[in-house]
Image (tube, rainbow, N blue to C red):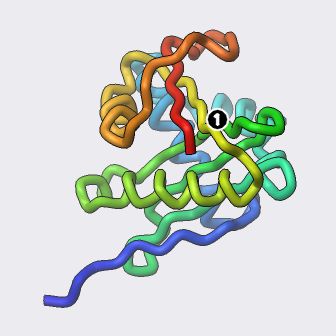
Amino acid sequence: MARMTWTFSPEHVDTPDAAALRRDYLDDVASRYWKRPATPEELDEYLTGDGAELLTPPTGRFLVARYEGEPAGCGGVLLLDGDRAELTRIFLRHAFRGRGGAGALLDRLEEEARGLGARRMVLNTRLDLVEARALYTRHGYDEIPAYCTGPYVDICYGRDL
């Protein structure tokens, strides 16, 4: 049997695949947080002016992950200052989980952050996103003091690149 492959391509956040993946990401995390399905109007409201346009050089990068050509996930890095980049919007569609894509996406995003000049990666997440937290700790991220505040910031992680 042929080995299935992951590919990662930098894309603008508004390409059809990137926009659909960003929407799926938000639907997943918002619905989990609210313990009910997010409405299309709520998703539209959040996606308008969410700052994703900063995920392009020189301030950041947004990647679309594909599994055998199918849009399967996404993630971004955003430069916070001269040394640090923030990992953001890491997501794999449920049908593609368990195939090694999350770790490969994380590795590629770290490469992108280094390419933008970052020497340290930080991120914030919620305690209920246990799969994400497990991914980060598995890849050498340690809990750090909060570097930002917000209603969805429960825990922060970081690591040197």
| Depicted 37 relative to depicted 12: above or below | above
**Is 33 in front, or is 97?**
97
Number of numbered tags placed on the structure image = 1
User: Image point 66% across, 36% down: which residue?
Assistant: 86
> Can you say whether 111 is above or below 39 in the image?
below
How far from the left and from the top, in percent, is residue 143?
Answer: 45, 19
Instruction: Name the image quarter holding the C terminus.
Output: top right
SS for tag 1?
Answer: helix
User: What residue is disc 1 on?
Assistant: 43
Q: Is residue 48 left or right of residue 62?
A: right
Which residue shows up at 50% across the image and 12% down it?
154
Residue 151 at what x, y percent from top left? Answer: 62, 10
From this viewpoint, is residue 48 visible? Answer: no
Horizontal arrangement in the rendering, residue 102 relative to residue 18 (left or right): left
Q: In the depicted view, which residue is nearer to us: 15 or 67?
A: 67
Residue positioned 67% across, 16% down in the render: 147
Q: For residue 141, which quarter of the picture?
A: top left
Mark 1 neighbour class, 10 Å CA radius: few under 14, some 14 to 19, many 20 or more? some
- Residue type marked 1: Leu
Image quarter in which the N terminus is found: bottom left
